[in-house]
Amino acid sequence: MSIYFIDGKFADKQEISISVDDRGYYFGDGVYEVIKVYNGKLYTANEHIQRLFESADKIKLSVPYTEQQIIEIASKLVENNNLDTGHIYLQVTRGNAKRVHQFPNPSVQPVFMAYALTNPRLVANMEVGITVKSVEDVRWLRCDIKSLNLLGNVLAKQEAQEAGCFEALLHRDGVVTEGSASNFFGIKDGVVYTHPATNLILNGITRQTVMRLCQEIGLPIEEKAFTLREAFQMDELFLTSTTSEVMPVVAVDQSLIGEGQPGVITKKLQEAFAAQIPVPIGKN
Ligand code: PSZ
């Protein structure tokens, strides 16, 4: 997995270098995406690349490639690295320039970097479910941007991990927003709830897939935020992300959700999710 794409070409990781003046390094001034690869095939790549363009637009950064070119770069990374199941990481920063806060003037070439990583599906976790810790959401008010500025997310995840939990359940003013790197869903009396796609959360691609699957299965789904207090009372709770897919949450702050096991509706959504991921080459 050592073939990277940077500065317009593919190169071995040993041979590439990044400038200390990269604004990603100084300011987290850039955006990124993670595209899942199943059995050597890119999954929902167009959606992720579209979101990369949207995030870049929101910070007035121009991505130096077209959607089709990025698909080609990602596909070549899969091929050159012989990636079976894992992901492609993509990031764009505002480029290399003397450290001043304002954008470089005249502007400089953005730095586009991408690599492939083997990352097996988290099947064991998905089977038994995971636990989460509630953490106050102290992040900025543009969480809809997939920006490299992740300190709030980093600190939340670390706090969760130190408590022996898989993920942080973030709440702002008592309202559940999302996870440090995931979206949360609650199920009560057969209705699926999740925070609306506002500036307070990242509108997850997996979140959108799961909302579509709910509609296809005939599960009522409402983009309506729930409180942390309500989260404890949910019949079922799960989180979604590119790498976690549909992940059952069986406890919040050591308090069991439902029976403390993956719920039936969550399992149904896991099955529906698994049914639409790319199958191994030669089996379709
Ligand atoms: O490898 C990992 O742990 C990944 S790959 C993508 C994520 C984690 N997280 C994306 C994410 C996020 O960073 C925040 C703050 N909210 C929601 C999500 C879920 O977005 P999707 O479903 O697009 O991955």
Image (spheres, grey):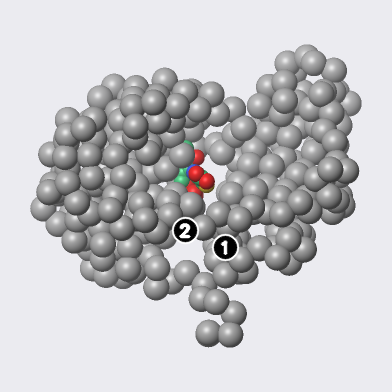
Question: Residue at image x 72%, y 48%?
Answer: 114
Q: Is mark 1 within 8 Å of ligand 1?
A: no
Tell me: residue 180, above or below residue 3: above
Q: Type of residue at label 1?
A: Thr
Tell me: residue 249, above or below residue 144: below
Q: Earlier in the sequence, mark 1 or mark 2?
A: 1
Question: Residue at image x 82%, y 23%?
Answer: 21
Can residue 239 be seen in this snapshot? yes
Res 164 quadrant in image: top left
Asked if labels 2 and 1 touch by Cβ distance under 8 angstroms, the answer is yes
Q: Residues within 10 Å of mark 1 (few under 14, many from 20)?
A: many
Q: Position of residue 120 (x, y in %)?
A: 51, 58
Where residue 121 is drawn, which disc sits there? 2
Residue placed most toward the observer, 16 or 180: 16
Task: Kindly state the secondary structure of the residue where label 2 is placed.
Answer: loop
Q: Type of residue at label 2?
A: Arg
Dividing the image into 4 quarters, which one contains the N terminus?
Answer: bottom right
